[in-house]
Image (tube, grey):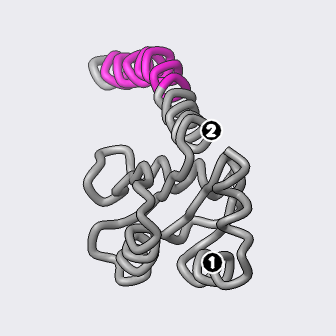
Amino acid sequence: MMRLRWSVLVMVTFAVSLFWLGPLQVKASNSVSAFVQNAIYSNRIAVFSKSYCPYCLRAKRLLAELNEKPFVVELDLRDDGFQIQSVLLDLIGRRTVPQVFVNGKHIGGSDDLSAAVQSGELQKLLSAS
């Protein structure tokens, strides 16, 4: 009889946990998604980066050489960095860093940014703002 009560208590606790934690996870997910969207569309240049990544450092250095000051999100320095990468995966199909956006347009990673500078595409996007 005691064993049955314990099982019921565990099941009720689990059900209550799902009820309470479910909405919190949805809110956190929505707020992370909103943060990513806001970063992309509210900044002239947004870079999703990791502070130790050599490709990220290259992209940020390239932008600095162009006298641009991007809004940089260092994923490894944030508690929600993994969630942000998941949002990026849903949004652009990539989890890798860096990911560079100019005036809301996805440029890509470090090599893509370099190619956009070489082709003049980056300058066109920047002058459109």
Where residue 95 appears, as percent x and y from the top left, is 56, 65
Residue at (63% x, 77% y) in the render: 117
Q: Residues within 10 Å of mark 2 (few under 14, many from 20)?
A: some
Residue at 51% over, 22% down: 27
SS for dot 1: helix
Q: Is residue 35 above or below residue 19?
A: below
Q: Mark 2 or mark 1: which is in front? A: 1
| 98 in the magenta segment | no
Residue 108 is labelled as none
Amino acid bearing label 1:
Val
Q: Going by the image, does 75 lie left or right of 97?
A: left
* Pointer 2 residue: 41
Q: Where is residue 73 in the image (x, y as percent from the top left)?
A: 39, 52
What range of the chain is rendered magenta? 4-27
Give the amino acid at mark 2.
Answer: Tyr
How far is disc 2 from disc 1 in space, using C-alphas?
Answer: 21 Å
Q: Nearer the viewer, residue 64 or 127?
A: 127
Asked whether 55 or 44 is in front, the reply is 44
The numbered disc on residue 117 is 1
37 to the left or right of 83 = right
Residue 26 painted magenta: yes
Determine whether the residue tagged by mark 2 lies in a helix, strand or loop. helix
Image quarter (top left, top right, bottom left or bottom right) of the N terminus? top left
